[in-house]
């Protein structure tokens, strides 16, 4: 339904869709989680979905007294990382930052790597590749694995997101817990737990030129009462559920 909302000509359609919303003291919230995550997707599609659609929704709901929550990636904060996906999210973030400075009630939340829920991990993601290798009992080749990642269970992030969205803060915020893990440690723990350590080949692939190494993000003060589960155990539990579903469907 919202796929064509990037088109400025459809502003009346967007406005009409949200016309029934009547906010009070910006308590009514519109979350815009839609996005294309694959950096190899068509650049024009990435920009349409990740940037232009949420920008148009923000513009078309300005008179409704609502709070808008958009979503980005923590990779926006790493200047060395450049790809079409990250750039589309940066364009949205820059727009949100600009209007938030003018007092508009809008958030742009930079998200780390999320897992959990009913869906399988995306095939192009690290956990997606691991799941395929575990399921097929095949060799898993990876880089040196020195990259740092924060892994967040979706249920924990929902609590964190609502904590920020219900606060007085506006503009760009980072949904961080401050406890990253090296990918090599995560992979080693996972393959060991599934008794497939011999299939893990660390260093078989060259490291990417731009990555997050040695950088840790700080958890916002608002998260003092938010509990985030430990990455390795959380991912292992999630992969067990995924593998069970795959076995049931085979």
Image (cartoon, rainbow, N blue to C red):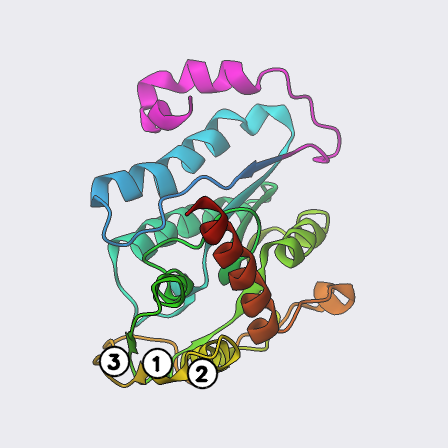
Relative image position of residue 237 (x, y in whole percent): 59, 65
* Residue 240 screen position, x and y as percent: 54, 62
Residue that badge 3 annotates: 207
Q: Does the magenta segment cover residue 82?
A: no
Say what secondary structure mark 3 lies in.
Answer: loop
Residue 192: image location, x then y, percent? 48, 82
Q: Nearer the viewer, residue 244 or 70?
A: 244
Q: Nearer the viewer, mark 3 or mark 2?
A: 2
Mark 2, other Cα within 10 Å: few <14 / some 14–19 / many ≥20: some
For the residue pair 147 and 51, the one nearer the viewer reads as 147
Q: Which residues are magenta?
A: 1-29
Q: Which residue is mark 2?
A: 188
Q: Based on the picture, tell me whether residue 20 belongs to the magenta stretch.
A: yes
Q: Earlier in the sequence, mark 3 or mark 1?
A: 1
Return the disc, 3 or 2, that comes first in the chain's sequence.
Answer: 2
At 33% across and 57% down in the image, what residue appears? 86
Sequence-first disc among 1 and 2:
2
Residue that label 1 marks: 200
Asked whether the beta carbons under mark 1 and mark 2 sit within 8 Å of each other, the answer is yes
């Amino acid at each position: 339904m919202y796929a064509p909302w990037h088109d400025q000509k459809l502003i009346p359609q967007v406005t009409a869709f949200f016309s029934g919303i009547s906010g009070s003291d910006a308590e009514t919230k519109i979350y815009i989680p839609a996005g294309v995550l694959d950096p190899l997707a068509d650049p024009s599609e990435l920009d349409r979905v990740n940037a232009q659609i949420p920008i148009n929704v923000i513009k078309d709901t300005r008179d409704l007294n609502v709070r808008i929550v958009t979503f980005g990636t923590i990779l926006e904060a790493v200047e060395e990382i450049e790809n079409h996906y990250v750039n589309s999210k940066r364009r949205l973030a820059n727009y949100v930052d600009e209007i938030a400075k003018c007092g508009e009630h809008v958030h742009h939340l930079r998200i780390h790597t999320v897992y959990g829920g009913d869906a399988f991990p995306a095939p192009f993601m690290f956990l997606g590749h691991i799941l395929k290798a575990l399921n097929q009992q095949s060799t898993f080749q990876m880089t040196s694995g020195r990259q740092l990642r924060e892994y967040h269970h979706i249920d924990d992030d929902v609590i964190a997101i609502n904590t920020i969205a219900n606060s007085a803060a506006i503009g760009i915020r980072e949904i961080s817990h401050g406890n990253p893990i090296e990918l090599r440690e995560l992979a080693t723990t996972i393959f060991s737990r599934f008794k497939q350590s011999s299939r893990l080949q660390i260093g078989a692939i060259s490291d990417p030129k731009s990555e997050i190494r040695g950088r840790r993000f700080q958890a916002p003060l608002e998260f003092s009462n938010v509990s985030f589960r430990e990455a390795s155990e959380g991912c292992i539990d999630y992969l067990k559920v995924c593998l069970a579903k795959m076995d049931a469907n085979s």
